[in-house]
């Protein structure tokens, strides 16, 4: 019997199969650009999940699905999710449960990732931490007393829509000034694009398509404009983390999601901003680290959700 | 046997005596401007507390002290508190414990106030709420699962130092762009002062000293400049509340502290901003209300801290 995990993102989706101890045995990543809408994307996710399940060969005991919020965990249905336009009202648990003949459990992807890091990652043994996913969008997960804190409507942790300014850039959620509009992968690429004409000397200008990854690598190579964009975004990310540190006084902040592949180039400036801007007594309590599960954090999280739901392990 | 509560603020301090059920029997408010420093202020608080205790006539069983954070609850000592310059390292519990021959317990004033509202106020029966004190500074208290959430170093809830901008006005904490520097009583008065020369027609110009209360009452009477200052501050307060709603998905937000004496003039714009700017699913879950204990919220909180510490009541 195996556990199937599905981490649905606005750009890509990872499916994976784990054994009953939570060890990931097989996984597959596919591109699921949100512009294609839910039906086409689900039409690609189902066969990818089928493929890993077939390859692994055991029957699926439970399915965990991680997805951007807000969502209704009890009914397995999405609300209006900023990075999945058109998915509102879709009941993901029903779709996957029917396909694999096993119970399916939906959770906020960042809460799921936090649970995954708690089970086998940078949150192991840490009672009180927050998780930021910095990816197509920005999401948050909160672990308090060793358990996910979900809030009264189970949608806590929307750190990506924290306003860092009354005005500011337009966010995918339709509002302005959100952390996500300053420091997500999408935002970094957009900011780089917007200023490109004014920086003809930047090597970003020769790129076919600008991504956050490209901005990070150009910045690492010393491209001045790329540095300006990258470290500007890291400054805002640091402010967002500082605000959460001030509010929740966590023991650890774990940073995961695609943009964190930049490693120290992300971690160092964020640490520095938090040290400068959060309250000293609270800075002294907190460690800021990268997710230990790397780019498998999301799918490990989805697996942790399923394991937690069926009581298959002391997840946290 | 009575419970003594002491709520120390940057502008005034309230001392009060309650019976063992938590009912406030007597209280007294004195001015304690933080510019006078800790020794002079404590020198005024002690006789005021003595006076209410003597008048009430019973022996003090326990003392609760609420004070701006960050602080060390275990040792009863203050860290560097932005609104109490010079108080760092002072062990408040020792001073009051010696004076009254009873155990003293220190807590963050906003956490204390949240506990007081949970015991007998707008938080009664609400499992999951946040409290904002909007006063000389801005502080926060968090109740999760019916208990104060304090964070790993017991200094969670520093909502006042949430950055609403990378730059922005200088805060009492020494940083810039904090909610407290935009929307506390001190900030409202300062903002009004700063723009006064450019608004000679405003009736605020004839005031000997501008306070947030004066700005609110001039705004209520239609003074255009006062409206601009007041509603600008309320907009920023609303953003701060929206950010906390997005992060914690609370059932209720309780607003207390001196500035909330403005009542509907504070509540309405804050509600409106939260409705516009926080995520819809989370807005639907939350009620935003004023503290039920009014200007006794702080001292009722201090009493709740003492009662909770000695197990005198099911405080929360």
Image (tube, coloured by chain):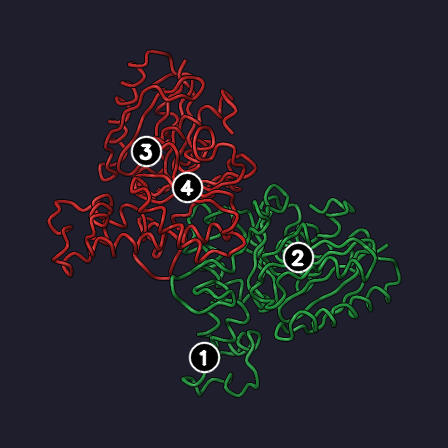
Chain colours: A green, B red
B138 shown above or below B276: above
Quick check: B8 left or right of A97? left
Q: Chain of mark 1?
A: A
Q: How many marks?
A: 4
Q: Could you tell me which chain the residue with mark 3 belongs to? A: B
Residue at coordinates 20% horizontally, 56% vertically from top-left? Answer: B225
Along the horizontal axis of the image, is A248 left or right of B58? right
Q: Position of residue A117 (x, y in %)?
A: 66, 54
Residue under disc 3 on the same chain as residue under disc 2: no
Residue mark closest to the camera, 3 vs 1:
3
Chain letter of disc 4 in the image: B
Q: What residue is pinned by disc 2?
A: A77
Residue contact at pointers 4 and 1, CB within 8 angstroms: no
Element on which disc 2 rests: strand
Pointer 4 residue: B289
Residue shown at 52%/29% (left/top)? Answer: B316
Q: Reading the chain from its start, which is encountered first: label 3 or label 4?
A: 4
Q: Earlier in the sequence, mark 2 or mark 1?
A: 2
Quadrant position of residue B16: top left
Q: CA distance from mark 4 to mark 2?
A: 30 Å
Q: Quadrant of the N terminus of chain A?
A: bottom right
Picture coordinates of residue B89 (x, y %)?
37, 36
Query: Disc 4 or disc 1, which is closer to the eye?
Result: 4
Check disc 1 and report the residue beneath it: A194
Q: Nearer the viewer, mark 3 or mark 2?
A: 2
Q: Is residue B85 visible?
A: no
Question: Which residue matches tag 3?
Answer: B295
Q: Residues within 10 Å of mark 2 (few under 14, many from 20)?
A: many
* Figure check: A106 above or below A210: above
Give the quarter of the figure containing the C terminus of chain A. Answer: top right
Residue at 28% x, 45% y is B185
């Amino acid at each position: 019997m195996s556990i199937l995990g599905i981490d649905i993102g606005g750009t890509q989706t990872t499916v994976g199969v784990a054994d009953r101890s939570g060890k990931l045995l097989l996984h597959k990543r596919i591109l699921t650009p949100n512009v294609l809408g839910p039906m086409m994307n689900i039409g690609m996710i189902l066969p990818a999940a089928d493929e890993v399940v077939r390859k692994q060969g055991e029957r699926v005991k439970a399915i965990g699905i991680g997805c951007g919020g807000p969502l209704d965990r009890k009914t397995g249905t999405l609300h209006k999710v900023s990075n999945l336009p058109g998915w509102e009202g879709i009941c993901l648990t029903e779709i996957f449960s029917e396909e694999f003949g096993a119970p399916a459990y939906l959770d906020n992807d960042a809460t799921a990732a936090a649970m995954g890091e708690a089970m086998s990652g940078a949150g192991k043994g840490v009672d009180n931490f927050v998780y930021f996913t910095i990816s197509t969008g920005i999401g948050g997960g909160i672990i308090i007393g060793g358990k996910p804190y979900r809030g009264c409507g189970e949608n806590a942790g929307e750190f990506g829509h924290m306003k860092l300014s009354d005005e500011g850039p337009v966010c995918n959620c339709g509002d302005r000034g959100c952390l996500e509009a300053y420091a997500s992968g999408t935002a970094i690429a957009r900011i780089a694009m917007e200023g490109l004409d004014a920086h003809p000397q930047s090597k970003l200008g020769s790129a076919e398509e600008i991504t956050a990854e490209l901005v990070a690598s150009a910045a690492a190579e010393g491209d001045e404009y790329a540095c300006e964009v990258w470290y500007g975004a890291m400054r805002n990310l640091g402010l967002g983390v500082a605000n959460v540190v001030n509010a929740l006084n966590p023991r650890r902040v774990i940073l995961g999601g695609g943009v964190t592949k930049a490693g120290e180039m992300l971690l160092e400036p964020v640490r520095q901003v938090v040290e400068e801007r959060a309250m000293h007594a609270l800075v002294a309590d907190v460690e800021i680290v990268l997710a230990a599960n790397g780019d498998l954090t999301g799918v490990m999280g989805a697996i942790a959700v399923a394991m937690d739901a069926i009581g298959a392990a002391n997840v946290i």
